Amino acid sequence: MEMKKDEDPSRVQVSKRYPPQVKEEILAWAREGKNWSQRAKELGIRHQSAYYWVASAHKKQFPHIKPLRKKTEKRATPIQVNSKIVKFVCGLYERNPKITLVKICKRMQEELGVTAAVSTIHKYLRGMVFARSKNPCPNYKSPENMEETRKYISALLNYIKEGKEIIWLGGLVYNLHTRKSVSRLEELHIHSLAAISSSLGFLHASFKRGLYTSDDVEAWIHEHLQSELLSNAVLVSDAFDKYSSSSKHPDRLRLAPLFTERLNPCETYWGKVTEELKSRILSGDIQIPFGGSTDENARLAYLESLISESMTTVMISNSIRRDGEGICERAVRDSLTNLAEVLQLLSGLKLEAS
């Protein structure tokens, strides 16, 4: 190798050739997981050369192979989406009304092994009836919610000891859409309201288009509930203001923020109505009218007729029970029995939080 005239001989790097056995020794150390860099230093081998040997051997051992293109998976058609899948999707939406169709498809793939396009799920479910609670899911680890629930149970037990008639109020919001873009629109929904008494069971239930305001609730109470019953009653609802309810007659008690499905028998009643709604649609005997999922009047009229028929069916099945105990009577009994269980659950949540 010739040197340039102006170049310092001490800075010229002369290329070296190492024996093959030296290279094999370095590679053997690398394969065994030993410190090949230290061994190369001991043998007087440049680190750059040893690194090149190890890196080149690694590339040869694991060559870059392009992944094979996956075959297009067979997607489910609307005909293949059976009632089991529909019930699964309905359950996802009821637990989280803000869930997107993309997340629904992912959950279907993970839990049911069914692959379906977003458009397929939307087109098939656009006429399904979904029910959701008016209030968001509460924070079960919040100390304030735990304390309010304890105060509610204590106040309710005191009212029962005084011989007061307990009247629970509760309802759901019914909607025909599952798309997030639709639910964000300022459109009307069907809002329901029911009253169940601790001694008489079912009192009244109805629904209307749009939200029940506080004035609407007051008018509903005095229109559909007997004044004699209200004279010695306590009204329980999550719609009451906990700061101003005590000044009204009859007495108001705000429902506990936690475990409302256990403490409010109206939840059981509307749950039965919702089950009847779903069974009617899943049977295929009732079809949504043309344009009913996009035209507001047609959609609401269709939904109102279904809710009315479902409420009638639930009341008929409630009146012909062989055990003599109706759905609402059993729900009242269960809600009172659950008071002690809820207190135990609150104690467990408090221990977890601490």
Image: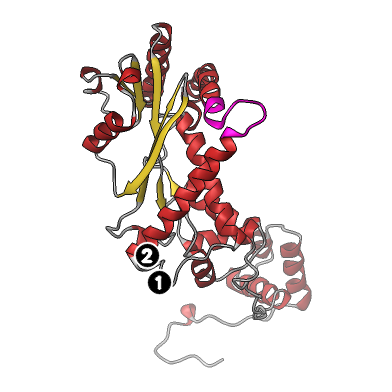
Which quarter of the rendering shows the N terminus? bottom right
In the picture of the structure, the residue carrying the numbered disc 2 is: 298
Q: Is mark 2 on a helix, strand or loop?
A: helix
Q: Residue 68 carries which label?
A: none
Residue 242 picture location, percent across and down: 27, 24
Q: Which residue is drawn at 53% across and 16% down?
A: 340
| Residue at image coords 39%, 62% | 299
* Callout 1: SS: loop
Residue 239 position within the rendered picture, expressed as x and y whole percent measured from the top left: 31, 33
Q: What's the amino acid at mark 1?
A: Gly
Where's residue 220, x and y in %? 29, 35
Up-down relation of residue 244 to residue 54 (above or below): above
Q: How many marks?
A: 2
Q: In this view, does 294 lie to the left or right of 320?
A: left
User: What whole-number distance in Å separates the C-alpha atoms at marks 2 and 1?
Assistant: 7 Å
Marks 2 & 1, CB-CB < 8 Å contact: yes
Q: Which mark is residue 291?
A: 1
